[in-house]
Amino acid sequence: MAKVKEYKMFEGCVIGNRIPFIEASARKVFDILDIQTSEGPFSCCPDPTGLKQVDHESWLAMAARNLIIAEDEGKDIISLCNGCFQTLKVVNQELKNDEHEKEKVNDILKSIDKQFNGTINVKHFVEVVHAVNPEKIKENVVKDLTGLKVACHTGCHYNRPSEILQTDDPMKPVKLREVVKLTGAMPVDYEEEMLCCGAGTGNAEEEPSMQILKNKFDSAIKAGAEAFIVNCPACFQQMDTNQRNLTKMFDEEYNVPILYLTELLALAFGISPDEIGMRYHRARPTELLEKHNLT
Amino acid sequence: MVSVDYEFKKIVMDAHIHDTLKYCYQCNRCTENCPVAEVAPERYDPRNIILSAFLGFKSDIFGVDDTFNLWGCTICDTCDEVCPQNIELTEIFSVLRNMSIKREEGPEYFISQASSIYENGKAIPMQSAVERRRDQLNLPKIQPPNVEEVQKILNITKLNKILEKNKEE
């Protein structure tokens, strides 16, 4: 019998401890697509836009400790989050290829009787879903989303730095678009598709972060998008929770539903919005769901 | 008149950035493609930070009135991709930010996130309301991280000291 591959699920702090409805959609979709996962006692990845900026060595050692938890079970990690993915994959590659760094980190990890060996890989869930036979995804689509125009937004840490991550094209990623198309939904071309959501800048100051977000929204709306499809919880939160701020700051109405890729797939697979907690979205998707018979 | 700080210059050049920094020829592609420079051109210019860093102009980066030139970067890694010399600008900014934190000049957000990670092992600690929501959504319990192990690591890397110093005042 062929060995069934099981991943260690890395839902991350934001999805696991703040917006778990995203995880609900991911788990349902993974079940349908036979992507098997199990949990682990992971700490914060840690955040490449947070702790890494405070102290590089702390970031490196904590990430190595998370990787070791998966190494101990001989399983690859599947990340639901861009930030966790970037941290874990970058650290994994760095330590696998740099003996000096590895020694330094292992010296620190001696204090907890652990050692990094570099025996596993780290995957972003978009890569894993994209690697599923497209026919398998199509045959599970019971609600054809033809007519739904969406703006794909992969976010920065999904595919950059490309030299290390090797997920997709660094400035013209295709995997998210290709998976979206399997549901019948149509990704629009918009000028600012590669523009960052601005969350990183927001950690220092709000105004420029909102200006970046506005540029992103305006470009997608102009191209006719009814919703954004995202694959990162930091982008999701930045885009979902700040539309009222945008309206206030710029005196323009913004109400664009933000859907996680796994939410879009769950809806296409016939799972009800209620079952995956879509009522917890700030930018209410009600109108969109009604329009496309997804309620 | 700015002066060159050779010690600072050496730290930057020796950091984990694969020796690429010295090949910068100031073509400005980083700034032209930067989403933050686009919305705040007077306050943020990645090319300029790189120039100050490799020339050793420490006083241009630290102890300045507006820290946005260092902390404004949204870490989108676009400059790293478009740089014709393969300079990992974002990594250099990260080295400089680590120094800025040691000088207690970093924004509050970064210290509070690091504190949460130190205390809980997570950037966002679990709350009972979210735990209930997870139950309602039929999600498994989050396995708690071993905080003791995390703290042991972070004491060796002296994150505890960095945080203490930043929280004084």
Image (cartoon, coloured by chain):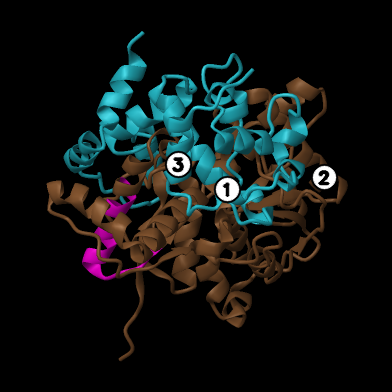
Mark 2 → mark 1, Cα distance in angstroms: 37 Å
Disc on the earlier residue, 3 or 2? 3
Q: Magenta stretch? A: A62-77
Locate residue B92, reporting x and y percent.
52, 42
Colour given to chain A in the rendered image: brown
Mark 1, other Cα within 10 Å: few <14 / some 14–19 / many ≥20:
few
Q: Nearer the viewer, mark 1 or mark 3?
A: 1
Predominant SS along the magenta part: helix
| Residue B22, label in figure | 1
Say if residue A51 shows up in the picture.
Answer: yes
**Do circles 3 and 2 both sit on a common chain?**
yes
Colour given to chain B in the rendered image: cyan
- Secondary structure of the residue carrying numbered label 2: helix
Mark 1 → mark 3, Cα distance in angstroms: 38 Å
- Secondary structure of the residue carrying numbered label 1: helix
Residue tagged 2: A219
Q: Nearer the viewer, mark 2 or mark 1?
A: 1
Q: Which image quadrant is residue B131 in?
A: top left
| Residue at position x 82%, y 45% in the image | A219
Labels 3 and 2 touching (C-beta < 8 A): no
Mark 1 residue type: Lys
Mark 2 residue type: Ser
Q: Chain of mark 2?
A: A
Locate residue A273, reporting x and y percent.
58, 51
Residue A55 shown left or right of residue A61 in the figure: right
Whether residue A156 is in magenta: the answer is no
Above or below for B116 versus B32: above
Residue A288 shown left or right of residue A10 in the figure: right
Q: Chain of mark 3?
A: A
